[in-house]
Amino acid sequence: MDKYTCVPCGWEYDPAVGDPDNGIAPGTAFEDLPDDWTCPVCGVGKDLFEKE
């Protein structure tokens, strides 16, 4: 699965890790994140992430 980076702050979403602090289980693809999910560091939406 592809990793995605937040353009404004540089935080990386790694599907192998997920975002457990926000209820996203490991193994969750970026495409499968809820539409209202936001970057846990700076709060921007999925539209401001780029595929690595």
Image (tube, rainbow, N blue to C red):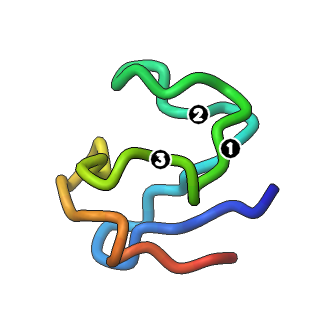
| In the depicted structure, whether residue 18 falls above or below residue 11 | above
Which image quarter holds the C terminus? bottom right
Along the viewing direction, whichever of 47 and 9 lies nearer the viewer:
47
Q: Are marks 2 and 1 in contact (CB under 8 Å)?
A: yes
Viewer-proximal residue, 37 or 10? Answer: 37
Identify the residue at image location x=58%, y=55%: 30
Name the kind of residue labelled 1 in the image.
Answer: Pro
- The residue carrying mark 2 is 18
Badge 3 density bin: few <14, some 14–19, many ≥20, Cα 10 Å? some
Quarter of the N terminus within the rendering: bottom right
Q: Which residue is mark 1?
A: 15
Q: Which of the 4 image quadrants contains residue 12?
A: bottom right
Q: Is residue 41 left or right of residue 26?
A: left
Secondary structure of the residue carrying numbered label 1: loop
How far apart marks 2 and 1 lie (CA) works out to 5 Å
Which residue is painted at 48% across and 31% down in the image?
19
Query: Residue 10 vs residue 36: left or right?
Result: right
Q: Amino acid at mark 2?
A: Gly
Examine the image and state in which quarter residue 15 appears.
Answer: top right
The image shows residue 10 at horizontal and vertical percentages of: 43, 67
Q: What residue type is disc 3 on?
A: Leu
Labels 3 and 2: the sequence-earlier one? 2
Question: Could you tell which of marks 3 and 1 lies nearer the N-terminus?
Answer: 1
Q: Disc 3 on helix, strand or loop?
A: loop
CB within 8 Å, label 3 to label 2: no
Q: Which residue is mark 3?
A: 33
Find residue 17 and report its horizontal and vertical position in percent.
Answer: 66, 32
Report crowding for label 1: few under 14, some 14 to 19, many 20 or more residues within 10 A (C-alpha): many
Q: Residue at x 56, y 49 (%)?
A: 32
